[in-house]
Image (cartoon, rainbow, N blue to C red):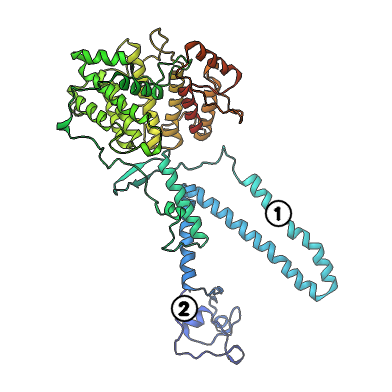
Amino acid sequence: MSKRLGVNPRRIFVKENNRKRTRTACNSCNIRRVKCSGKQPCDACFAAQRLCDYPSTDKKVFVGKGEYEDLKASKSLLDKCLAEFLPDPEQRQSYLSQALQDTNASQVGSAQPSKDDEVHSGSSAASISTSARSPPCETAPRHHHHSRHGAHVPKLEQLDIGATEGSLLQDRDGNKRWLGGTSGATFLDHLKKFMHTLKSSLGYCGTNADTSPGLKFLASRGQYQTSDSQLLFTPASDRIDTTLSLESWEVAGSLLAKADEYLQSCGSTWACGGIYYFGDLSVQAWLAVQRDETRRREVAFYEAAFALGTIYSLTAASSRRDGQLGESFFAKARNILGDPTEIFLYSFRDVPALIMMAMYMAEMNRRDNAYIYLSYAITISCMFGGMKGSFNDERDKRIVWTLFCLDREYACLMGRPPLYSDEAFQLHLPDTTPILPLPSGLLAHIELSKIAGYLVTNTYSIAPRQAVDRCSNPFLNSLHMLQQWRERLPPDLRIPLEVQPEYQSQISTEDFPADVRQKFKEQLKDNTLPFDRALCVLHMKWNQAS
């Protein structure tokens, strides 16, 4: 019988030496309110031939209410951390059982010497026997410790590590957006939660007057920095004249040169040839579009390039002010193209402008807006057969592959699945042509973007596809693919992993003639740091993925 009667509150406490009955009656005698002898079995149960059970004697521990609440909160937080590290309930339960067995074994090992001490105080013979038995008792927990870290702990290849889960994070205006595990904002949010758990478990509680940067950082859990909910400082639509453009050739040339340098490096003579391609960003091409009325919509491409060139021309942090970051150029490009939902207005010629506008939004800390513009661009490209390679122009082919790379890049940035799978891009890879830069950098970027897509879909389980080998570890597969990518790079695209610390290059090659730049290209063979910005960005992306 498991139920017992409650204690009589009017019963007077009697000291142990004055009691005439046992301290705790068995369950049967307690329910019947009869005197219990306290034996096993007691006299009453033995005479009645019934089961004699006593309640479990758990030692009561009295702690303060505040300490008790802190212990409960710490346990809850630690359970959440364990659930994030091991999402599988069965695997989590097996690890908890293993830890409980280790704890019980250590308690048994520590309790055994205390019994030996009692025997040791009784006789000298028992003392000798105790000293002979002590080493096995001390070495038993150590042997179990080694077996735990050797045979019972799975290896990295066998451990099924749970993928980093995404989070619904809110911006400063309170709007929530879902960001996946590859997003930097999600990583920071998990870091904040982990640090808050450690702070709470250590019992540290900051005061209300504490305004340290660390506490402000932890207080921003569940939030991330973005300007997606805020409007750009653009002029009103009725005040934008789409027929006007920059009057100064020097200003236009400077902005286009900055955009070309940071985006595709088509004007350079490096072997990389750039890792993107958007179009001709020369002043001559801009003037040709200005004069041709039939190409009026292509002006939006150059207006978006002016907006990006304005941002890339900033030289100090104090110069980044709202209203002076090329917003007017962006507004003009948006007015020229019109509403993206009116799909009959658009053609494949508008895709480069949409890509530029997406990259401008990303530079303005509006990544969700950039994601939308990129989705418009890739959808229009698919609608006009861009992914099938229904055109023979090498420029259009490179624009589509640039879309492919940016789609994977933004998928990693936001922790969201790519818009189209790798199999959807069925056009040929970029080829070498005399009128365009070498495609080596773009080809390497395409292969790296495929690995980035695998990282997003499979490794972080954002949009997983069933793999051929179910036993393979996606984390190890990703690292292996990244290593193979670097080993297969052509010699002209390689950068040494270790650069000499004394190497500090302050040389700018913008105004150097072609023959001098060729000498700097030859320095790649001597394992020195190259001056090709696009190549450095490519290897930076590889390091971020690794």
Taking the view exactly as shown, the residue that stands out farthest to the top is 434
Q: Earlier in the sequence, mark 2 or mark 1?
A: 2
* Position of residue 405 measured from the top left corner of the image (x, y, whole percent): 39, 25
Taking the view exactly as shown, the residue that stands out farthest to the left is 238
Disc 1 crowd rating (10 Å Cα; few below 14, some 14-19, many 20+) is: some
- Numbered label attached to residue 4: 2
Q: Is residue 324 left or right of residue 436?
A: left
Label 2 element class: loop
Q: Is residue 508 above or below residue 361?
A: above
Q: Amino acid at mark 1?
A: Arg
Return the residue nearer the eye: 297 or 251: 251
Q: Is residue 172 above or below residue 452?
A: below
Q: Is residue 33 left or right of residue 428?
A: right
Q: Is residue 440 above or below residue 198?
A: above
* Position of residue 483 measured from the top left corner of the image (x, y, whole percent): 55, 27
Residue displayed at 43% across by 26% down: 449
Residue displayed at 42% across by 13% down: 437
Label 1 element class: helix
Q: Which residue is mark 1?
A: 142
Q: Is residue 490 visible?
A: no
Q: Write down the quadrant of residue 367 in the picture.
A: top left
Return the residue nearer the eye: 317 or 220: 317
Residue displayed at 54% across by 23% down: 486
Distance of mark 2 from mark 1, alpha carbons? 44 Å
Q: Is residue 70 visible?
A: yes
Q: Is residue 10 left or right of residue 131?
A: left
* Position of residue 329 measured from the top left corner of the image (x, y, whole percent): 26, 28
Q: Write down the quadrant of residue 323 in the picture.
A: top left
Q: Amino acid at mark 2?
A: Arg
